[in-house]
Image (cartoon, coloured by chain):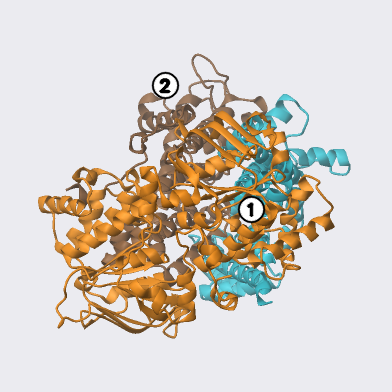
Chain colours: A brown, B cyan, C orange
Amino acid sequence: MTEKMLTLRLPTPRNLGYSFNWIGRIGLTIIVLWALVAIFAPWLTPYPIGEIVDWDYFGPMSHQFWLGTDYLGRDMLSRILMSARYTVGISLASVTLACTTGVIFGMAAAVIGGWFDILLSRMLDAFNGIPSLLFGLVVVAAVGSSIPVLILTLAAIYLPGAYRFARALAVNVNTMDFVTVARARGERTSYLILHEIFPNIIGPVLADLGLRFVFIVLVLSGLSFLGLGVQPPNADWGALVRENIEGLSLSSPAVVFPSIAIASLTISVNMFIDNLPIKIRDRSE
Amino acid sequence: MPASFIPYFLVAQRLGIALITLVIVSFAVFFATDLLPGDVAQILLGQAATPEAVAGLREAMGLNEPAIYRFLSWLAGLATGDLGTSYVNNMPVSQLIGGRLISSLKLAGVTTLFTVPIALSLGIGAAMARGSLFDRVVSILTISVISVPEFMIATLAVLIFAVWLGWLPALSYGVEVDSWGAMLRGYAMPVITLSCVVSAQMIRMTRAAVIDTINTPYVEMALLKGASRSRMVLRHALPNALGPIANAVALSLSYLVGGVIIVETIFNYPGIAKLMVDAVSTRDLPLIQSCAMIFCISYLSLITLADMIAILANPRLRH
Amino acid sequence: MTDIPLVSVRDLTIGATTDAGRRVQIIRGVSFDIAPGEIVALIGESGSGKTTIALSLMGHTRTGCEITGGHIRVGTSDITAMNEKARANLRGTAVSYVPQSAAAAFNPSQRLMQQVIEISAIHKLMSRSEAEKKAVGLFRALALPDPENIGNRYPHQVSGGQLQRLSAAMALIGDPQLVIFDEPTTALDVTTQIEVLRAFKSVMAKGGISGVYVSHDLAVVAQIADRLIVLKNGEIQEEGATQQILDAPAHPYTKELLAAFKPVTQVHAAFERDPKEQPVIEVDGLFAGYGLVMNGEPQIKILKNVSFKLERGRNLGVIGESGSGKSTLARAIAGIVPAYGGHILFDGKKQQLALADRSKEDLRIMQIVFQLADTALNPAHSIERILGRPLTFYHGMTGRAREARVIELLDMVRLPAALRHRLPGELSGGQKQRINLARALAAEPELILCDEITSALDSVVAAAILDLLKELQRELRLSYIFISHDLSTVQAICQDVLVMYKGEVVEALPAARMASDARHPYSRLLISSVPQLDTGWLSGLEQDPELLAAFSNR
């Protein structure tokens, strides 16, 4: 009884009947690599992350320490691998939270319409009038920084955007005749949202989720860089840059590599999203 | 003709929405900071204070009043320019902010002057030469800049210009700004960083806006009238893209607000963002609230301006 | 025509690269000539390549397409051998173009005059004041109102019919030898279409200009073209003088096209009804509209006091031009746009006006089918799921019983059972419209509201759908309300017709005697404006200009 289940059609190459180009594949490979690192970090680190292994601080790249050592003489490679957990994990959690809530509310607003739509849209638009980094600053100032607070704050920052995006898509789908037909049949709102609208916006929503993930990584890194994100002894990539900023004048690898880690993740997500296949029918005229 | 009032009505409506938003935002800012755990009076007086002293201070600060009342009086103070008194050094907030705000505005102003012409020419150029090598190089560069955090651009700039080339000082603070050359050197690094962030957004949006207009049937019609490519773009596409471009400019400038926070911190630039980040670490509430409001107002003004430009630039509404 | 032809096209092939990177040939070896002063029509359905050929005469191909072989000569210029700059010099002076949608082809931020005379500025043909004088002359020749001043307006300040004539003025300003008309009246209402066609015909004849008229509508083309070229899949099927092709088509495809136009004399009720039976639907004093509801009335009021009655087994046609409210009527009956006044009785039983208040059973017996099959089928659902849902929803069917019924429904609309595993995107337009119909049938309704269901289809496919509707009616004892702007479609299936204008029913007529029985001036104007498949129809047509001015959407 497949028809009773919600059959998700994910935009995989096979489903679309296309495959995507090599830039997209490189992007995807790097994303998968970082995801694996985040999952298996404890088994991959050559040294314990908290241990001071080198007498020299801001050590250069060497055979012993591939990415050099940090301001205390800890192994940078181990620290970067371990920090991937925080950067990827927190960002993924908040982007999922933001997009799920945003998409559900967005679809509901589009289908229900009327005052529900107007009020919700106005309220979230007002929320959008707060610059994101600033909102993070104020919340962290107010309630202090912890991982749950960070996840919720970042999710709150991107919820209005996800809502607006999903609503715009859903409003377009909602004007389609097949939704009108279902409505005229007497279907409930929940059926309309789940079965008629959702399968038709899932592709763009997933692409949007990727872009929002990038922004969240950037804001999280920014907060950590200001010392307001992930707190010691834990560290994400932004915090690693902050810790080692003194090494900048020595052009130490300890300040360069965390930045490269962030850039490699965000650029690959962008590359992947930009090169997703666009489904266009083969037509001659 | 009553139709000619429609754009003004829409602009007025947009302004109204902006005002309502501002009230909601101020509400959010006030209560977000009001959630601060711990008793402010206790924090101010330290752990050694007697309960009587704490109670007295609470009374003096009006902390026993209901939150909504405190919010309204804070809002009223804000409207009349009374920003309250700093908890940390007991100075009026307006005095603390005054000079810092001007420094930040200078930074933003210089960046804008520097960014807009470059970003517009690159964006329009890339759109006109769509698919060319130039377009692809610009696209890759802008994507890369957008994909990395602001502090990374800043650290890279320091690494290149201060550490390796030794052309510019790494910090702005303490640099004498009495001569043009010195000022240029002092501003250079923050401005370079901010410009990168803002112009990348601006180039992308401008390019998209121009391409949208180039793809319209009336531009194809110009081609079928025998118009040259430059005539198509200059006479038909650009005039219609002006609105969207202005909108893109205003919207990208709103990225200044976020960028400035990072840039002032990293370069130790004595602006309002640095003041706010410091206030966050000392939990100086009135200062945080005022700074946050200033940021929100500037951000909101920019996005409202962008919306209003978009409305006024619509030729159907204009004539 | 013994002169040297003005245009000669030899073995033209045009290739296209699809978005998936596949190369396809869309024009396969087309050859034809156009004599000076002759108007040739390129006739064909969507995908036949008619617009592509027409644009290639200007040396222009749309993005992704390119001329891969053959020669095009216009006057003394070899278009295929020219570079882009030389082609640009010809555009507007030797060959010019009248677009399908003038509304999109005018730059919204420039005054009309500036755009009309732009060709003379690009090619430095004459001074600005001369060009403006010439433009005013053309405006007058094209029967535009207020020719002296209309050029000072902006595109959105004039009507669609006026814009279409202004675009003709724009094409004629550079005294071209050849004008390409790309479906210039397709987007217009019939009453407007007549004026535009008349204007085109007279300026072309006066200037002795050659023309290429691209259209899918044989009746329109019959009025304006000297010769027809029938195209299908990028190849010429038949070519000949207009009258000759209309009288004696040789190619089977041409015959098929013409057959779709055959006038239907009289449609009898599909089955005998029991005289004691109630009318299947009765609508009394219906008011409906859109927008936020204030004081029980919506902001935008569309329907005003609409009443009618439909007996079982008969079909009702609702005709009218854009903005007449005919689609809103269908939606108000179905409850999608809740009426705010009046009554709807189904089988003598009063219906709730709003969808949300109706029972499942009330919803089941009345189904609505929409115009665009593309948007009426959820692209993410398989055909089986699309047809199966109403079965589960109304009849509680599941599993094997449901699958068997889906196959049965597909059979009813003459589609193979294997189609049920496909997605809508994989079907043709006609197949989609059949699925659309099958979904309505799945509910086992008594009344089907058809909202322009054949308008988006090519004429041959549309004719087949109409035949299917008639068959189904006999088998399933259905009644239809048939909304259309196309009078011949309505005549082909309905016994009674309502003429609507600005939200009101102006007249109810028997379909077979519409032309003779119409009394209301608007219905007479509308009926007389439908082009006939007769080359002399337009010249012989006499309409009261005042009436035209009063009622047409100018």
In the rendered structure, the residue with mark 1 lies on which chain? B
Q: Which residue lies furthest to the left in this view?
A: C401
What residue is rendered at 56% in x and 76% in y? C544
Give above or below for C195 relative to C423.
below
Give the residue pinned by disc 1. Answer: B251
- The spot of residue C130 in percent (x, y) is 83, 56
Q: How many marks?
A: 2
Report the quarter where the N terminus of chain C lies.
top right
What residue is rendered at 45% in x and 48% in y? C245
Answer left or right for A174 relative to B66.
Answer: left
- The spot of residue C187 in percent (x, y) is 52, 59
* Residue A44 in view here: yes
**Disc 1 vs disc 2: which is toward the camera?**
1
Give above or below for A257 relative to C533.
above
Of B260 and A161, which appears nearest the observer?
Answer: A161
Report the quarter where the C terminus of chain C lies.
bottom right
Q: Which residue lies furthest to the top in this view?
A: A63
- The spot of residue C404 in percent (x, y) is 12, 51
Quarter of image, res B88: bottom right
Give above or below for C258 relative to C14.
below
User: Do the CB atoms of the residues marked 1 and 2 lie less than 8 Å apart?
Assistant: no
Give me the disc on residue A46. Answer: 2
Question: Circle 2 sits in a helix, a strand or a loop, which is it?
Answer: loop
- The spot of residue B235 in percent (x, y) is 73, 49
Quarter of image, res C2: top right
Of A215 and B124, which appears nearest the observer?
Answer: B124
Q: Distance between the residues labelled 1 and 2?
A: 46 Å
Question: Circle 1 sits in a helix, a strand or a loop, which is it?
Answer: helix
Give above or below for B234 relative to C502.
above
Q: Residue furthest right?
A: B179
Answer left or right for C361 relative to C108.
Answer: left
Of C308 and C154, which appears nearest the observer?
Answer: C308
